[in-house]
Amino acid sequence: MAYKSVKGTKDLLPQDTLAWQHVEQVIRTVMESYRYGEIRTPIFEETAVFARGIGEETDIVGKEMYTFVDKGGSSLTLRPEMTAPVIRSYIQHSMGEQSSLNKLYYIGPMFRQERPQAGRFRQFHQFGFECIGQQAPECDAEIIAIAASIYQRLGISYSLKLNSVGDPFCRPRYKEALQDFLRGVYDHLSPESQRRTDTNPMRVLDSKDERDQVATANAPVILDYLSDESRAHFDRTCALLDELGISYTLDPRLVRGLDYYTMTAFEFVSTDLGSQDALGGGGRYDGLVEQLGGKHTPAVGFAAGMERLLIVMEKNGYVFPSSAPSVYLVGMDDASRAWAFRSAIDLRTKGIATELDYAGRSLKAQMREANKLACTFVAIVGESEMAAGQAQVKDMRKGTQESVEFSRLADYFTKDTENAF
Ligand code: HAM
């Protein structure tokens, strides 16, 4: 029987990982310029971290988590997202006591048991960042600016949807008004939304079901119910985005699929993605630290799907930088093959990517292989080259050839910036 990777999961092969590494490098460069530090938390957590953090009524917690009981009887869950684990870690390591502002970023795999389709996987990867400790709208605008900057560097065009989901003072009033409205159109709602009318009415606005969309077309919107504080925070966030030249559309129906949000909520979408059009999303979550057992601490963050980003980059014909120059050493007899083996190790020690033949192939077959591997240089050595202490070096890009002394080879391959490794 031939085994296959589990449904909704994917192998990333060397030809794929080059693109991934490039994207990761761009993310790290941008994060460093904003002085974010990388955090790596375990792949699994106690289930309660997510159940309490994300909310029992969400699709993620209710339907999509990979939860299992380990042999010690603990309920554990493969992380479906990183905000709750980051906050768990923030509290555990008393980060708030060491600094009034903690800026953390991450890149890694997440797990959700959703129905796989284009752009939707069961193991997928996110990059994300969390700014913990301040409520200033500058932090919200900056989080959005970082995401925009990463997308821009990767040649991805997007639109940005923005909303405020209010705070604990204005939300109850809005929920009541929304529930009143939903009860009026109850018979026209999907069964899921009928249930949510009582448990989590704001999520009804987010439903993809056409019945719900028609029935709620005239539902009250949160922006009309914001408290003075939330209104001022939202207006200032919008003004800052305007100053930064980041365009957005207000979407009063944007509620996002996680319960921890307060005030700012936003999503980056791409028309290149089909039905799963969310490139990434985030918002403010001022109650989460307290919810997970810490002191009241405002925070705002964002996370994006890496697979979706790469899908769009490929569609847009993004040109990935070519890999570093490399060398293929060709030996033609026993002595020159032994030289090639020794020299390959020497060149690699000097940081030069080097290939050679291990199968005793002919000169012609080795040249074919060097071509197939797209090596930049081929150094050919036979009996006469061994005697002269020189290799015939072919520059495969220019089609030129010259003799180079063995002792000068490493310098030759790195001689100008064009050849730099
Ligand atoms: P989220 O909207 O659940 O937010 O996920 C963020 C992004 O992860 C989505 O926009 C999408 O690009 C990607 N994604 C989610 N599920 C899948 C999937 N099954 N397959 C492929 N990609 C997927 C969060 O996770 C929040 N933690 C974001 C955040 C950070 N809010 C504040 N800080």
Image (cartoon, rainbow, N blue to C red):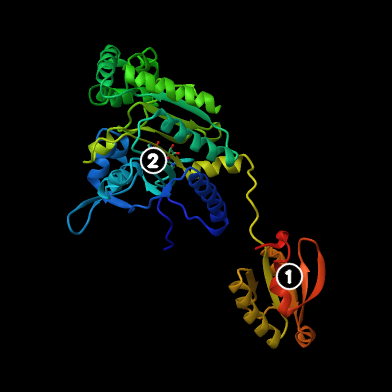
Residue pictured at 33% horizontal, 45% vertical:
86
Q: Where residue 45 sits: x, y (%)?
A: 27, 50
> Does residue 49 appear anywhere in the picture?
yes
Work out how far the residue at label 2 is from the one at label 1, CA to CA, in angstroms.
46 Å
Task: Give the vertical position of 371 relative to 7 (above or below).
Answer: below
Label 1 crowd (10 A; few <14 / some 14-19 / many >=20)? some
> Does residue 246 appear anywhere in the picture?
no
Q: Where residue 27 sits: x, y (%)?
A: 51, 46
Q: Is mark 2 within 8 Å of ligand 1?
A: yes
Indicate which disc, 2 or 1, sits on the residue closer to the N terminus: 2
Q: Is residue 161 left or right of 233 when viewed as pictured?
A: right
Task: Give the vertical position of 69 relative to 291 (above or below).
Answer: below
**Where is mark 2, residue-wise?**
130
Q: Where residue 346 sits: x, y (%)?
A: 62, 77
**Where ligand 1 lies, by image quadrant?**
top left
Task: Give the vertical position of 366 relative to 418 (above or below).
Answer: below
Q: Is mark 1 within 8 Å of ligand 1?
A: no
Label 2 crowd (10 A; few <14 / some 14-19 / many >=20)? many
Q: What's under tag 1, amino acid-wise?
A: Tyr
Image quadrant occupied by the C terminus: bottom right
Q: Is residue 119 left or right of 354 when viewed as pictured?
A: left
Q: Is residue 22 left or right of 85 when viewed as pictured?
A: right
Task: Give the vertical position of 301 relative to 340 (above or below).
Answer: above
Give the farthest residue toward the left.
73
**Where is mark 1, residue-wise?**
412
Q: What's under tag 2, amino acid-wise?
A: Glu
Quadrant of residue 258 within the rendered picture: top left
Residue pictured at 55% horizontal, 59% vertical:
14
297 or 219: which is nearer to us?
Answer: 297
277 or 189: which is nearer to us?
Answer: 277
